[in-house]
Image (spheres, rainbow, N blue to C red):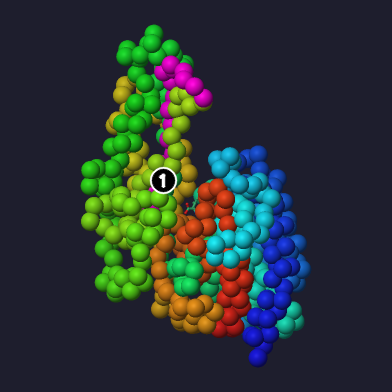
Amino acid sequence: MTLEKVLSTIDDNLPAATERLMELLRIPSISTDPAFHDACEAAADWLVKDLASLGVEARKYPTPGKSMVVGHVGDRGPHLMFYGHYDVQPVDPLDLWERDPFDPEVQDGPDGPVIRGRGAADDKGQLMTFVEACRAWKAVHGSLPCRLTFFFEGEEESGSPSLIPFLKEHADMLRADLCLICDTGLFDAQTPAITTMLRGLLGEEIIITGPNKDLHSGLFGGAAINPVHVLTRILAGLRDEMGRITVPGFYDGVPELPKDIQAQWEQLGFDAAEFLGSVGLSVPAGEAGRSALEMVWSRPTCEINGIIGGYTGDGFKTVLPSKASAKVSFRLVGTQDPHALRKAFREQVRAGVPADCTVEFKEHGNAPASVMPTDDPAFEKARLALSDEWPRPAAFIGSGGSIPIAGYFQDILGVDSMLIGFGLDDDQIHSPNEKYNMSSFHKGTRSWARILAALT
Ligand code: BES
Ligand code: ZN
């Protein structure tokens, strides 16, 4: 049977596929840092070339930010679009990495070999599972199974600023019957998953200025206002003692979880103690009376992602700083409106800034939450295909992360997305020593071959 042949081709070519992924991982395509702009373009060029080797007509489309890579192949059967992102997160703190983040290596791990390096799991390794499945398919069949559009973005980790204009301008080129996105996780190492709910994201930076220069905290302390104190009071006020977010109107559009989904999630046997224990914690934080799984998959949150201000170097400096700033993100669910919440958040911050200080805001992306249409027959076909590959049957799960494009595809192109990925909670995405299990890469590639067979 030809699917078996495709699967055995994937098995035979795993070392070569791994080597190709290593090449891509060596390119430091950090999208948020302008110093790595050329590296992002180099990653896009690498992908154009790699797609060309599959007979896909691909090219870069420049944007005001990073280039998009779009490729097309085939003219029969359903039209599937595949999306992944080639940009990665910054690597700091660099001293916590065991090796150069852009000098990837296959290492032995407690659960088998892992590919270690920035972007291994998020999202270069995942992106290549689909590409490698196509390569094996083509080697066996001489062509790909249906009409395919490949769409790779280089700004996902920095809030996709060029994406909406690009989708609007190229809607006809990108419109497909269904989009496949490989940027999410397994439920656990045995259980594959289709992610059916993603949280939205609202990012804000607040910069508070007090005195017009840094001051001696002895000469001025007490009389001069300290912007770090102003900032921290405002930040502390964002949550009340029950863990609820205090921004007015924040819970408008936050639904209670439907009973059927709640029942499905309960059956997954999620172990909250193990989830928290894996990061050295034991007591659930956040909203009182909500389970850890519920808080991550279906409740909104507000997190301070960074605080900058004053002297943070070695030793001690008695400074009263002129400026203090913070980066804050909100994860959104249901129909929470990122634009309305940005406005309400800014009003709340302004109300906490005393007369002698000024505040500036910078916007860092806004995307509503998305819920996928699981009644589309493609979901059941993919669920069965995944269940054939992995030890346990596939689950429909939620996710606390955000992939803004899923909502944009729906709103701008009218295209639904199916989110299937092979990452694990211990992959350390966005953190030092990111890794992707070789089994994720290998079985992920085999999974896509099975899904392609099921959908075409
Ligand atoms: N791949 C992640 C999101 C993710 C991870 C979803 C694991 C589900 C499981 C994605 O690249 C990511 O990190 N997105 C950012 C969004 C962004 C606008 C910076 C996020 O969720 O923080
Ligand atoms: Zn990602």
- 315 in magenta: yes
Q: Where residue 443 appears, x then y in whole percent?
A: 59, 73
Q: Position of residue 427 (x, y in %)?
A: 52, 57
| Spot occupied by residue 230 in the image (x, y as percentages of width and height) | 34, 27
* Residue 138 seen in the figure: no
Q: Amino acid at mark 1?
A: Ser
Between 279 and 143, the one lying in front of the other is 279
Quadrant in the rendering for residue 343: top left
The residue pinned by badge 1 equals 329
Q: Is the residue marked by circle 1 packed among few (<14), some (14-19), or many (20+) residues within 10 Å?
A: many
Q: How many marks?
A: 1
Q: Is residue 345 left or right of residue 168?
A: left
Name the residue at 45% across, 79% down: 393
Q: Looking at the figure, which quarter contains the N terminus? A: bottom right
Q: Is mark 1 within 8 Å of ligand 1?
A: yes
Q: Which residues are magenta?
A: 314-334
In this view, 215 is above or below 304:
above
Left or right of 199, for residue 7: right
Residue pictured at 61% horizontal, 51% vertical: 118
Vertical side of 452 occupied by 132: above or below:
above
Q: What x and y, as percent, mark residue 189?
A: 49, 69
Q: Is residue 434 magenta?
A: no
